[in-house]
Amino acid sequence: MTQPVFDEQDDERIQLSALEQFSYCPRQCALQRQDEIYGENIYTIKGTLAHERVDSLIAETCRGVRNVHAMPLFSRRFGLTGKADLVEFYGATPYPVEYKIGKKRNWIHEAAQVCGQALCLEEMFQCDVPLGAVYYISSRSRREIRFTPELRDIVSAMITDIRNAFAGDMLPDAANDARCLRCSVVESCLPEILSKKNQAAEYIAAIYANTLQADDKT
């Protein structure tokens, strides 16, 4: 796994929650994390309330498994910070669990966030963390995540992409697809307008390229 370059003196730490957000929509992530543009809708409110309930729970031991809620996490190697909704300890081995509203789904976005938590836990406790899970509140079901070398490489590359995106002056392109229907910052993003501008720019660039090719043939 190629480790992202992180300068502790100059670079800001990346929030673990940004891994899921950037994977899902880089533009939404940049608007909120870089430009500090936030919005609320029914989905963000439900998510906030659900996490508040989880975070209010106290550490406990059940059937030999120690459960720690709202556990602060960090990684100096990767420049990550944040917290885990729940970390279960099976002996000395941590097992991060991320809570999500909605029903069980097979998304890479959530897996990336939990994998980032595992990277932090491995550094903090100097141990291997092979597994974690996403818990879906609506369906009361778990999806276990195996932190394979392939997933770790994806997350490592994503950390670099996020840092590069935040360092630049331009926002990522607008998606203008089904993701926008549930987005809390859609009014600031203006995906329909900006995507049309992008399409127009691509069309003009294509015409210009064809003109150059025609000129070369004459």
Image (spheres, rainbow, N blue to C red):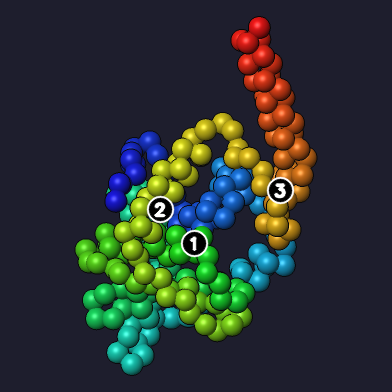
Quadrant in which the C terminus appears: top right
The residue wearing badge 2 is: 154
Looking at this view, name the residue that lies furthest to the bottom. 63
- 150 or 76, which lies in front? 150
Cα distance in 3D space between marks 1 and 2: 10 Å
The residue wearing badge 3 is: 176
Disc 3 marks a residue whose amino acid type is Asn
The residue wearing badge 1 is: 108
Looking at this view, name the residue that lies furthest to the front. 217
- 186 or 111, which lies in front? 111
**Is mark 1 in CB contact (under 8 Å) with mark 3?**
no
Quarter residue 114 falls in: bottom left
Is the residue 155 above or below the residue 86 in the image? above
Quarter residue 173 falls in: top right
Label 1 crowd bin: few (<14), some (14–19), many (20+), radius 10 Å: some
**Tag 3 or tag 1, which sits nearer the N-term?**
1
- Identified at 40% across, 39% down, the residue is 11
- Counting from the top left corner in percent of width and height, residue 171 is at 60, 38
Disc 2 marks a residue whose amino acid type is Ile
- Counting from the top left corner in percent of width and height, residue 82 is at 43, 59
**Is mark 1 in CB contact (under 8 Å) with mark 2?**
yes
**Tag 3 or tag 2, which sits nearer the N-term?**
2
Disc 1 marks a residue whose amino acid type is Ile
Label 3 crowd bin: few (<14), some (14–19), many (20+), radius 10 Å: some
